[in-house]
Image (cartoon, rainbow, N blue to C red):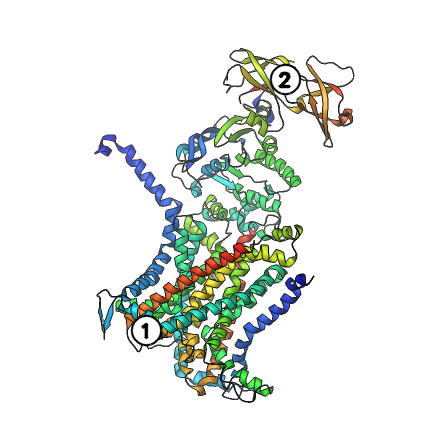
């Protein structure tokens, strides 16, 4: 019975992971910097990726995520700092002797070889006995649902199939870590969503540590155990998808992971774990203080996701509510975006409401009340 | 001394840095190209330097006198025979490049804008004759233009002329016709490449803004393809100045060019320094002419706006 | 309306047709008169014969020249292609200072007057005391072949997805193994194409061979020598026709291979293929 309240609001970081992971570190990145002349592609990054984890490096292009991945693979070297994989320092070890394998963004399928020969490429050097090589190739092809296509030429494959060949070719090497460089970016939307599910399933089946580089926040949220969000060569936040989404450490992270309403606030009281702030629209709010919070005078920023604001219909009331007026309405099929002006707030609030109750029919200009949970209001650094 | 004081860490760092240097992109790239680069240095740059050196020396029978002198250049520039040859060579190569470019432009335009799916086939068709022996192509013009040649016998057969014309072969016109034919493909390719780079929406934009096809061609396509026209002109002009085979085979007395004189200095006349000075002068003049051509075409390009 | 017509495909295609005739007509006369019975090339044609071709194998000087041309062509094409591979790989794969300048220098023989290239090399070789022979001809031919080899190979190497080599290293293959198992098979058509192009150029090249050879003649030099004798013209026409056909075949194969190489390397980008 004491478990009861946690069903409503699970707190654990691991809640999204459906499987126990060890706490052993698989990849340790210590103060890694990569400079090209005066430009720092990666600036003093430190990160630990656990064994068996599906880890994503998320950020806009040029944030250093691919540079970091390529340094783990051995295609690039840190200007300073160290990288260890499986407890072994990687300095001076070339790419072909690292316990990592990579799925390239372009897939890099050898066009002069067929599917089987592509998958067996790395095994050839191992000189496996008997039918072991053939058996492993077939197993890998089965893992990615390509059984029977072994004799096809790379040029005869569709985008999705090429991606599977690239996966099989890396997995067949049984690496400690599988590195994926934007593997889904070249696929169309539908196939991409299907592959997200498959990749996640595959990772859980093989239990290998996956490190995924992506600029697509939904991809990272849907697949990862943990995410590192990167901007301008620096790691901004490392946490579970849920924490990243719900408790972004700063406005940049919040913005990158979907819509967020920002509200200016005055700090009334600050202690170890929490902040009490005054806002114009939401009144006095007590909120968790983010770990990296740096006080900058008396001002702070609060954020609330558009879907955490609910329309109050008719005479319904809520313990916490704000009142305003609908100024714009945008219809998106299953949901509607409402732009609501709140007296006292300099920017109107953006609200996402499902269309079950007729949010798509609310006329512009209607007075409206919105319910919110004070827990959904998060304080952020700028 | 410092290394001894500071111990081994700095030493390790230097080695690591040297390793990084050896593995760095520029060093690897340079190492890879160096054999070819050296080959070109030794068999192209060095020989040209030797030629330049010789042009300032004098020859007495079989020995070379290495005292600096400008005598060879004085001869090359003032002796009427060499001056005439130089002028004729320049005139011929300029005329040939003008003709090849004018004749080649419509073809390049046709392939680029109307070639459709057969672009590469057209290009292949046009370059194939170019890959056959230059000597043979010149020879075939001799066969065509000769006194008993194809053209004369053909025209007589058709009753247009009564006796073979001697005006066809052994003069500068024969040289110009032959060279224009021989260098045609060389002129088409650069123009085609630059036309391919012309963004088609720019032409559409010009049409949208009220230009007719001819005006949009003159104001957009032609100026944008000027770089191709420039390289086409140069790529024909520079080698044809020094052509040897064509004047020798179809030029006759009136079609002799500077290359024949240069060859003579290294052959029968055996005056290497004079031959060297003639070569250097030719190269200098053709460089000046090439520069002038670039400037003129650029100026025309600006006028078109 | 008239301006549209002037620039339209219709008029231009007529012009293109005439242009192609202009390009091919002179060349066509060689084979035509090589099977004509009359010893002088003039109209009307007198009758069909293969006599001039039948005479060719009975000319020892010609056979020597053919053998010399073959030796020179093979040596020059192999050397030029090896040097071309190194340079093309460096140009397409790496970025370094003076890259464009070095590239320009290597391509320079393409636009320099051949006579000047030839006499400068001649001067140096005489200064170095090198006696003129087929070897010096090979040296000269390599120099003029490299730019063509570079052009063919660069088009084969360009667009070669670097991640293919990275993938190979990632799968445990060494640098040499990667070259043998990935790079070489991918660019093989371009390399063969370069060999054929260089061989064709060397086979047809006259000026450099003329200046740099000693007593041994190559085919073009042999033809040049025969041109002085009007009576030898039909034989020269027959030989010329054979050379034309050889060049045409070699270049067609080279072009097909070059395109295959280019298609292969470029295919990697074709994600929607």
Q: Count neighbours of disc 2 (C-alpha within 10 A) and say few if under 14, some if 14 to 19, many if 20 or more.
A: few
**Residue A375 is drawn in which quadrant?**
top right
Please state if B25 lies on the left or on the right of A21 as rendered.
left
Residue A113 in view of the camera: no
Tags 2 and 1 on a common chain: no
Label 1 secondary element: loop
Q: Nearer the viewer, residue B281 or C134?
A: B281
Label 2 secondary element: helix
**Residue C132 is drawn in which quadrant?**
bottom left
Point out which mark residue B79 bears: 1
Is residue A297 depicted above or below A59 in this figure?
Answer: above
Point out which mark residue C256 bears: none
Please state if C33 lies on the left or on the right of C110 as rendered.
right
* Residue on which disc 2 sits: A6
Residues at marks 2 and 1, CA–CA distance in whole angstroms = 106 Å
Chain of the residue displaying label 2? A
Residue at 60% x, 86% y is: B158
The quarter of the image holding the N terminus of chain B is top left
Q: Nearer the viewer, residue A112 or B286?
A: B286
Q: Position of residue C19 (x, y in %)?
A: 58, 70
Q: Nearer the viewer, residue B220 or C167?
A: B220
Chain of the residue displaying label 1? B
Residue A211 in view of the camera: yes
CB within 8 Å, label 2 to label 1: no
Q: Nearer the viewer, mark 2 or mark 1?
A: 1
Q: Position of residue B281 (x, y in %)?
A: 35, 66
Residue at 47% x, 32% y is: A233
Q: Position of residue B245 (x, y in %)?
A: 42, 75
Residue at 42% x, 53% y is: C100
Q: Position of residue C80 (x, y in %)?
A: 40, 63
Q: Count neighbours of disc 1 (C-alpha within 10 A) and say few if under 14, some if 14 to 19, many if 20 or more.
A: few
């Amino acid at each position: 019975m004491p478990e009861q309240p946690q069903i409503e609001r699970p707190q654990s970081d691991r809640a999204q992971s459906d499987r126990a992971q060890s706490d052993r570190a698989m990849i340790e990145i210590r103060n890694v910097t990569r400079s090209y002349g005066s430009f720092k592609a990666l600036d003093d990054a430190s990160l630990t990726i656990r064994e068996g984890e599906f880890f994503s490096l998320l950020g806009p292009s040029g944030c250093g995520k691919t540079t970091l991945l390529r340094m783990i693979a051995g295609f690039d070297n840190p200007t300073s700092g160290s990288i260890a994989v499986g407890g072994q320092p990687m300095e001076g070890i070339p790419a072909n002797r690292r316990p990592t394998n990579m799925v390239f963004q372009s897939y890099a399928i050898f066009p002069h070889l067929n599917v089987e020969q592509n998958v067996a490429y790395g095994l050839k050097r191992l000189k496996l006995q008997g039918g072991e090589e053939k058996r492993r190739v077939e197993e890998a092809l089965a893992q990615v649902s390509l059984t029977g296509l072994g004799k096809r030429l790379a040029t005869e494959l569709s985008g999705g199939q090429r991606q599977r060949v690239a996966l099989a070719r890396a997995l067949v090497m049984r690496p400690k870590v599988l590195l994926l460089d934007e593997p889904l970016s070249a696929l169309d939307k539908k196939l991409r969503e299907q592959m997200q599910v498959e990749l996640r399933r595959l990772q859980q089946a093989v239990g290998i540590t996956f490190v995924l580089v992506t600029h697509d926040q939904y991809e990272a949220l849907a697949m990862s155990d943990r995410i590192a969000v990167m901007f301008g060569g620096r790691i901004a936040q490392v946490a579970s998808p849920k924490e990243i989404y719900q408790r972004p450490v700063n406005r940049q992270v919040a913005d990158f992971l979907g819509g967020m309403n920002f509200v200016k606030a005055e700090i009334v009281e600050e202690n170890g774990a929490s902040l009490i702030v005054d806002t114009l629209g939401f009144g006095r709010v007590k909120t968790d203080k983010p770990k990296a919070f740096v006080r900058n005078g008396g001002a702070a920023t609060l954020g609330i996701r558009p879907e955490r604001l609910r329309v109050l219909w008719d005479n319904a009331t809520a313990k916490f509510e704000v009142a305003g007026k609908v100024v714009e309405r945008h219809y998106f099929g299953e949901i509607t975006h409402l732009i609501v002006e709140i007296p006292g707030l300099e920017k109107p609030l953006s609200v996402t409401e499902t269309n079950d109750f007729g949010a798509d029919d609310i006329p512009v200009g209607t007075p409206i009340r919105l319910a919110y949970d004070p827990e959904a209001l998060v304080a952020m650094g700028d | 001394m410092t290394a001894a004081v500071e111990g081994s860490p700095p030493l390790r760092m230097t080695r690591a840095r040297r390793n990084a240097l050896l593995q760095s992109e520029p060093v690897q790239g340079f190492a890879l190209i160096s054999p070819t680069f050296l080959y070109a240095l030794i068999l192209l740059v060095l020989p040209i330097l030797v030629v330049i050196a010789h042009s300032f020396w004098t020859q007495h029978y079989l020995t070379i006198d290495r005292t600096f002198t400008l005598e060879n250049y004085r001869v090359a520039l003032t002796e009427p025979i060499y001056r005439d040859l130089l002028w004729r060579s320049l005139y011929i190569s300029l005329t040939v490049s003008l003709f090849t470019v004018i004749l080649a432009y419509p073809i390049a335009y046709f392939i680029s804008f109307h070639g459709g799916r057969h672009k590469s086939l057209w290009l292949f068709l046009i370059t194939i004759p170019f890959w056959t022996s230059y000597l043979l192509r010149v020879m075939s013009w001799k066969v065509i233009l000769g006194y008993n040649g194809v053209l004369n016998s053909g025209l007589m057969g058709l009753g247009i002329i009564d006796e073979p014309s001697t005006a066809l072969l052994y003069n500068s016109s024969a040289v110009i016709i032959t060279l224009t034919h021989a260098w045609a493909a060389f002129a088409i390719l650069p123009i085609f490449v630059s036309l391919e780079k012309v963004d088609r929406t720019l032409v559409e934009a010009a049409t949208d803004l009220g230009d007719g096809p001819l005006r949009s061609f003159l104001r957009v396509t032609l100026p944008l393809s000027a770089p191709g026209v420039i390289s086409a002109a140069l790529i024909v002009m520079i080698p044809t100045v020094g052509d040897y085979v064509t004047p020798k085979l179809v030029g006759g007395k009136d079609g002799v060019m500077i290359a024949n004189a240069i060859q003579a200095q290294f052959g029968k006349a055996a005056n290497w320094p004079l031959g060297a000075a003639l070569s250097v002068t030719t190269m200098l003049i053709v460089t000046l002419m090439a520069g002038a051509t670039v400037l003129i075409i650029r100026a025309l390009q600006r006028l078109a706006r | 309306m008239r301006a549209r017509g002037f620039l339209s495909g219709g008029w231009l295609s007529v012009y293109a047709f005439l242009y192609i005739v202009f390009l091919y007509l002179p060349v066509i006369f060689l084979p035509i008169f090589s099977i004509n019975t009359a010893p002088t090339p003039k109209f009307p044609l007198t009758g069909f014969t293969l006599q001039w071709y039948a005479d060719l194998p009975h000319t020892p000087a010609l056979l020597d020249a053919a053998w010399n041309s073959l030796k020179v062509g093979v040596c020059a094409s192999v050397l030029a292609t090896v040097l071309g591979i190194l340079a093309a790989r460096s140009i397409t794969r790496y970025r370094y200072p003076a890259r464009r300048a070095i590239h320009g220098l290597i391509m320079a023989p393409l636009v320099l007057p051949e006579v000047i290239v030839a006499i400068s090399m001649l001067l140096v070789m005489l200064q170095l005391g090198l006696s003129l022979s087929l070897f010096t001809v090979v040296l000269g031919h390599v120099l003029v072949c490299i730019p063509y080899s570079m052009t063919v190979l660069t088009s084969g190497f360009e667009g070669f997805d670097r991640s293919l080599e990275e993938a190979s290293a990632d799968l445990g293959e060494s640098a040499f193994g990667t070259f043998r198992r990935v790079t070489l098979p991918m660019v093989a058509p371009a390399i063969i194409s370069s060999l054929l192009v260089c061989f064709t150029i060397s086979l047809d090249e006259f000026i450099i061979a003329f200046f740099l050879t000693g007593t041994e003649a190559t085919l073009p030099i042999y033809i040049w020598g025969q041109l002085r004798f009007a009576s030898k013209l039909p034989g020269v026409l027959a030989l010329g026709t054979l050379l034309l056909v050889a060049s045409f075949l070699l270049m067609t194969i080279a072009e097909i291979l070059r395109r295959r190489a280019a298609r292969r390397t470029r295919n990697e980008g074709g994600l929607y293929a």
